[in-house]
Amino acid sequence: MLELSTPVQYVKGVGPRIAEMLAAKGIHTVGDLVHYLPFRYEDRLNPRGIAELRAGEMATVVGEVRNSGLFRTRSMPIFQLTVGQGRARLRCLWFHATYLQDKFQPGQMIALYGKVEEDQRTRELQIIQPQFELLGDPTDSGENGAEKKAAQSLEIGRIVPIYEATGKLTPRWFRRIIRTALDNLTPELPDAIPAAVRAHMGLISPRAALWNVHWPEPGESLQDLQSSRTPAHIRMIFDELFFVELGLELKRRQQKAQTGVAFRLDDGVRAAIKKILPFHPTGAQKRVLKEIASDMEKPYPMRRLLQGDVGSGKTIVAFEAAIIAIENGYQVALMAPTEILAQQHYFSARRILENAGYRIVLLTGSLESDRKREIRRHIAQGSAQLVIGTHALLEEKVEFARPGLVIVDEQHRFGVMQRLKLMKKSGDSEEKDGATAAAEPDVLVMTATPIPRTLALTLYGDLDLSVLDELPPGRTPIVTRQVSDDQSSKVWDFVRKQVAAGHQVYVVYPVIAENEESELKAAIKMYRELSGAIFKDLKVGLLHGRLDADLKDQVMRMFQKGELQILVATTVIEVGVDVPNATMMVIEHAERFGLAQLHQLRGRIGRGAAKSYCVLMTGGKVTEEGQRRLDAMVRTNDGFQIAELDLELRGPGEFFGTRQAGLPSFRVANIIRDAQLLESAKREAAAVLAGPNAEISSEEISRALVQMRARWQHTYGLVEVG
Ligand code: ADP
Ligand code: MG
């Protein structure tokens, strides 16, 4: 009998060499193997009759090989195969497929899957490059008659699972080996999901789920199978999500049990906030500040994610929160992902906060070491109240006298919580002095990545969420157009008009300097062309990552003050940069940028009352996917819509940067497709941890927790929880 934890090489048919190939796929145990789910299913119980096929449909056809052969056309060799069912025939073609030459013999049964198309000239139906499987392949030697028959029964006359091949391991090989594993799997598969949860969700047993997900019953809906919505799929997906959510929920509870700073929020603090506000906050800003303030008053540490689209006004909210902490006698760290942004925050902090007498310092990697040392001393002594820097602040183990609040701006990746552990070190010295017991500082993470709310809530179960869903008043939507760069002279004319009207313009390039292989236009070269010829009479600046920090700073400041009219830049300006007078952005080679990146870039304009324009210039060939990105940008300014499409185009793994983020990479779940199940899992996990009660026994809870810990360690590869 096999257990789920049995190493995969104990499955009959898997030797050490194959075990190695499987390991490369992340399959180490029997459990991993049976969680390797089919990516589609073929209905070979009711395969399509050739006569009833329609052009345009995806179809499974089972038939007999009639004849085959290789034709050499002038452009390429084409392999042609004719398959028959009685008198009906269907032609299949493969391009460049000399390797198929001796593969087929008349009389063999074959299953084909592909898109049915109509031949332009003959009007006959055909399938181009179908996936195929020879049924009862006679080259499979060494099996006796009975075994062969059994094997064949897996291939035809049923709904057949199709697995992704890997190296030499074919879909058919997986089919047999997974079948063998299931046949020999121990009948006792304990179910660690409490009975009440199973009942709420209508979950079938783990064993039935494993079996049916690979070998669906004949009556199963093919559509449910393909969309992973059969009871078997749901059981497996929920199972995976439930234990992730259980872990997150536990973390969240542990956080609430820690000691934090209970900030006081009296009239004095309120007045101090009011005093610095340069404008009336939006309704959303007021609401969000309330949420943050009420967290800060609590005796446990705040862990809050503030989500707000580009330009929604997150900075001022951060400053308000900072004042609460400072007025209570604590220090605040504000961290930005780039030096440019840290600089910018430093200047606006000084503009907005310094009048009120707050002491603000900037600490970035590029400072002279003497200066750095001095600033660190101010921080350690507590005389610096607001410390602004890059995320490097964390790594550099800066010692704070009284850290109260940490704000992380423009956090696109979510691995930040782990790294915040470093921040804790700052409190250690205090503990030694015995001055105060080290309380955990509050943490506010700000992001423009618009993850759909429910998804954010469930994914970052250990964070609370606030959303700025309103833009400051008086903004007109940005007008976005796509043009080819052979129209560039018109675009430059328009740039001139904007400048003549007193506005400023960004021109963005994908690379800093040109190199021989790439034909991409580069910032440095185009800067010469634009400043030396096209806009000779205007003030043009250049900004890219390789400039030294002082120069970057100087250029940025000149642009901010309006001393430069045009800023030629790379994506260094992507996040956070705030120059409301800039009303136009030209992005060259826009087809090269990712969707999220384009949206962030465009977020640099449309920050004032004047109408803003974004021109997406394309140079060279635009791929189909590239065109979809550009279309989305032209169609909408809404970050949430853009994020949804981005998720769809890139898939959740890429989108969230799963690995760096320390998020689980799921085996069967897909957090986009399964967002609803994720929500249910979160709800059920919370209910379980709130127990025990009439529905859930304490024994069930501890069983679930044991299982959860095992999974967090082994399967998701996450750091241990609690
Ligand atoms: P983001 O959320 O992208 O960080 P910022 O905080 O940089 O946005 O704010 C964008 C611009 O809007 C800034 O110029 C800021 O001064 C301005 N702003 C923010 N809130 C308001 C408001 N309530 N009324 C008017 N202008 C505002
Ligand atoms: Mg910002």
Image: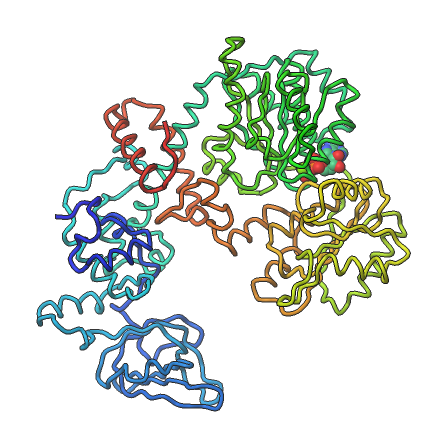
**Relative to the observer, which residue lies in front, 211 or 584?**
584
Instruction: Give residue 412's position: percent from left, percent from top.
Output: 56, 41
630 lies above or below 608: below
Horizontal relation, residue 703 to residue 253: left or right = left
**Relative to the observer, which residue lies in front, 71 or 630?**
71
Pick out the residue farthest to the front.
370
Residue drawn at the location 48% of the way across and 89% of the way down: 121
Instruction: Give residue 417's position: percent from left, percent from top.
Output: 49, 32
Q: Which image quarter is the C terminus in?
A: top left
The answer to whether any part of residue 312 appears in the image is no
* Labels in figure, total: 0
Instruction: Give residue 683's position: percent from left, percent from top.
Output: 40, 33
Horizontal relation, residue 132 to residue 555: left or right = left
Question: Quarter containing ligand 1?
Answer: top right
Instruction: Give residue 279's position: percent from left, percent from top.
Output: 77, 29
Give the quarter of the image for residue 244: top left
Give the quarter of the image for residue 494: bottom right
Residue drawn at the location 56% of the way across and 62% of the way down: 625
Horizontal relation, residue 514 to residue 53: left or right = right
**Relative to the observer, which residue lies in front, 104 or 293?**
104
Residue drawn at the location 65% of the way across and 20% of the way down: 377
The answer to whether any part of residue 524 appears in the image is yes
